[in-house]
Amino acid sequence: QKEVEQDPGPLSVPEGAIVSLNCTYSNSAFQYFMWYRQYSRKGPELLMYTYSSGNKEDGRFTAQVDKSSKYISLFIRDSQPSDSATYLCAMSQAGTALIFGKGTTLSVSS
Amino acid sequence: DVKVTQSSRYLVKRTGEKVFLECVQDMDHENMFWYRQDPGLGLRLIYFSYDVKMKEKGDIPEGYSVSREKKERFSLILESASTNQTSMYLCASSFQGPGVYNEQFFGPGTRLTVL
């Protein structure tokens, strides 16, 4: 079993839809959870960061971590065409390198 | 703003050539990383460095080497380029330590084509 699993999609939604992106992981020692967004032909940039379990909200974006299920989610409310990108989850233990998911490609149509 | 720059956005090389990819960061980060990104395979770590002149192998180091002579600069070297090294190469840097300091800042990437 891979350490981090992420459905590559592609995921296509109409503008205004709620989007749910997910990752599962196998290493129960992971404590730091991140979501990166990568636009076409650009490097990834950090979108959301969560430590341990719980929720974090930033505008239209909500990150959730369920450590008991080893499952993390990113929700995008009122999705916009500008949200069209690849979303990568990433996680790590304290002081170790990030482990990335393969990324989910999202397309939001107007 | 943190800035990670890479020497080239696009590069075309021939099989057998020695290729140098340069990365520079301006935030005094201790850690620097080189990844390659391929469709369906995601980001794969080639090498990373946690200090000047220090390097650690990542998941796919074969066919690559690295050099870190200065804190701000991390070079990836393809000793003898092969067609299966055609890929997007991404450099990243981060502070050391847990928590928010794990955040990696990425450069724009170099799309390398080996003919």
Image (cartoon, coloured by chain):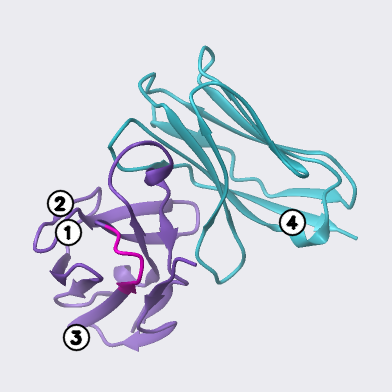
Chain B: what color? purple
Does label 4 lie on the same chain as label 1?
no
**Residue A7 x %, y %:** 59, 39
Q: Disc 3 or disc 2, which is closer to the eye?
A: 2
Amino acid marked by disc 4: Asp
Amino acid marked by disc 3: Glu
**Left-right relation of A54 to B106:** right
**Left-right relation of A45 to B102:** right
Q: How far apart are labels 1 and 3 at the CA level? A: 16 Å
The quarter of the picture where residue A21 lies is top right
Q: Which residue is mark 2?
A: B56
Residue B17 numbered mark, or none: 3
Q: Which residue is mark 4?
A: A83
Q: Earlier in the sequence, mark 1 or mark 2?
A: 2
Chain letter, cyan in picture: A
For label 1, the crowd category at 10 Å Cα-Cα, with few meaning under 14, some 14 to 19 and many 20 or more, is few
Residues tagged 1 and 3 counted as in contact (Cβ below 8 A):
no
Q: Badge 3 sits on which subunit?
A: B
Q: Which residue is mark 1?
A: B62
Give the residues drawn in magenta, as a range: B24-29
The quarter of the picture where residue A40 lies is bottom right
Q: How far apart are labels 1 and 2 at the CA level? A: 12 Å
From this viewpoint, which residue is outermost toward the left? B53
Q: Would residue B13 be counted in the magenta stretch?
A: no
